[in-house]
Every structure is written in structure tokens, then in C-alpha cells.
Amino acid sequence: MMEIRAATIRQKGGPFRIENLILDEPRPDEVLVRIAATGMCHTDMVARDQLYDVPLPIVLGHEGAGVVERVGSNVKKVTAGDHVVLTYMWCGHCRPCLHGDLTYCQNFYALNFGGAREDGSSSARDAHGSLHDHFFGQSSFGTFALTHERNAIKVPREAPLELLGPLGCGIQTGAGAVINALKVNPGASFAAFGGGAVGLSAVMAARVTGATTIIAVDVVPSRLELARELGATHTVNSRETDPVATVRKISGGGVEYALESSGRPQVLRQAIDALGIRGTCGIVGAPALGTEVSFDVNGVMTTGKRILGIIEGDSIPDLFIPALVELYMQGRFPFDKLVKFYPLDRINEAAEDSEKGITIKPIIRVAL
């Protein structure tokens, strides 16, 4: 066992509390990672605020990046000293996993939101007993994280490690939705509804795919300006104009692809209505469990529109995360323009800035 510092959530709505905890040694199939930095994602706030059923108290954090400290006796994928990005967890033995549909693992919710390993055990404890951990198989808001070999993704040492954590979830989700799930093609029209980290990652990915009409829709002028810098050919402030009518006008009758990342039902309806004939709308926003949305059934049916749920960008992390790192290193995917760094002891400030829209993608830098 070893002592670590980590940010815990002990009650609905927080705050994060920096505490000294004890962490177990890695099991045979596990990897101990010394965390360099961890991205803060909307899903951390969803868990903190109990919009999803996540057990408390818990150590959150699911966009970790760091250096492998030790590995279990059966681990072959990484070795001590390797640089890794930590991503979502999947079981590897259910029918979807065996088909290669890792993000639709039958055990996805339990493994990523259940606060424990697949066997129900946890690895972190305080003076009074066990805490919930293994959030997204990692719980990386701390100095060390214990993860399965499966969801530790090796990345090149020459890449800036403390920047890479968000590739494990938010950035991967937006980019993967465009590249892997929607399969936006050269010359296509695409609209991102929502200009946060996921939506802006989608904008960058659309430029990488060769889409020629790339529309960013948001209500924050600074985010729309950044979207232009990152590859959007058009921007729409939905507080100032009807986004559906404007997107349809720009695209000549409706876009071929749209992505909704805000988690707001009314925005999802706008994204669906903004589609052209045979258009596809991807859903990646995460509202509270049980949230419903309405749409015009005939408007969808008679135009052949498709509505597609997407988890983690339909990504196979061992392939997709290194590809995103390479795109970044080539200057073709500048996601560093989304981030701002905060030390671990200012994690509550990072959360507040994120929720206020001051910071698009906070990264919690861990001081060792």
C-alpha cells in the first residue's frame, strides 16, 4: 500500500476535498500510474452533482495522463517509465466487446460509474475505511491512479504529457464522433451544436476530414471566435438568431451531419431540425438520467433523417488516442487552445470556471 493525495467528493454537489488516502498495490492485471495532469470533464460534474447514480464518497477524474510507476505480474502492454493516457473502461468479454464495440460494452455503466472494479472491490481508503474509486477505471484526480492494463494507452514520450489527458474522454468524444461514428466525408456539411471542449474538438476533426462547410453554434461570442480559428467556416450565435433557419440557409437546405454536445433537449431538437434530407444527428451531450426530448416524427421519417447515440466517439482508444496525438504533433489538431491549467489544490476553482464558461477545458496539474 502507498499514501497518495486525491480530491474526494463526499456529498452531492461537492466540494472537492484534497485528502491523504491509502492506495493498494497493483493486482496482476493492473498498472500504477504517477499522474502528471488530469482533464476536468462535464461528466465529472455530472457525477459530483448526482445527475447519474454514482456512489459517494468517491475519487473522480477520468482524463488522466502520467508515467507508469509499477505494473502487475501479468501486464504486457506497458512497462515502468512508459507515458500513458488513461481512458474509459470496458470488460472485454461481453458480446459487444467481442465484436469490437468497446464503447457499448454491456458493463459500461458499472465499470465507469459504479465506483469499483468489475468484482465490486475498490483500491483506495481513508482512516475510516474504503472509498469508491475506479471512476472510468481510473479515479485520476490525485497523485497516483490504479488502472487496468486495458485502459492505459501508451503515447510517445516526445508529446507534452500534461496536455494529453483530455484525449482520454472529452476530446476523444468530439473528434471520434465526427471521424468514427458520423464518418464525415470530404466536401460534407457539418454543424456542431455546442462550443465546449467536445463541440470544438468536433470542429477540428471536421476540418481534418475535409468537410467544407463547418458551422459552430453557441451563445458565447469568444467560443464562436475560437471556433473560427479552429476551422469553422461559419458561426451562429443562437441568442441572436434562429439557429435552425440560419444553419439551413448556410448549408443550402440543411446539413448532412450535426452533433449535439450541450445536453440540452431544446438544442438537440434544433440539431435534428437543422439536418437536410438523409442527414444524421449524433448525440453526445449528457443530461440527467431520464431526460426526454420531442421531435417531429414525420419531419424525421419523410426526410430519412437519422438520430445516432454516440459514446466516447465510438473510439478504440489504443488506435484513436495515438492518432490524435500524432495529428496534434503535426499541427493539424490544436486542442491545446482549449485548455487552462490549475494546480490540484485549486480544483474547485477549475470546476467553477468550467461551469461559468470561463475555461473550456480545465486541466488539473498534479504537483508531486
Image (cartoon, grey):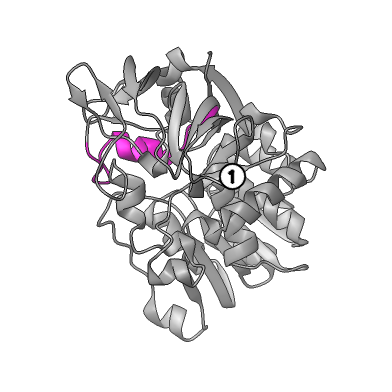
Q: Is residue 132 magenta?
A: no
* Residue 234 point in image, percent of width and height: 70, 52
Quadrant assignment, res 296: bottom left
Provide the residue span drawn in magenta. Answer: 37-55
Residue at 32%, 15% in the rendered image: 19
Residue that carries the numbered disc 1 in the rendered image: 153
* Residue 204 point in image, percent of width and height: 69, 49
Farthest left residue in view: 128
Q: Is residue 302 left or right of residue 278?
A: left
Front-lying residue, 43 or 146: 146
Residue at 40%, 72% in the rendered image: 95
Residue at 47%, 29% in the rendered image: 354
Is residue 195 visible in this depiction of the protein? Answer: no
Farthest front residue in view: 73
Quadrant assignment, res 250: bottom right
* Residue 94 point in image, percent of width and height: 38, 67
Front-lying residue, 156 or 205: 156
Within 10 angstroms of label 1, few (less than 14), some, or many (20 or more) residues?
many
Using the image, determine if residue 37 lies above or below residue 174: above
Q: Is residue 39 magenta?
A: yes
Q: Is residue 1 left or right of residue 299?
A: left
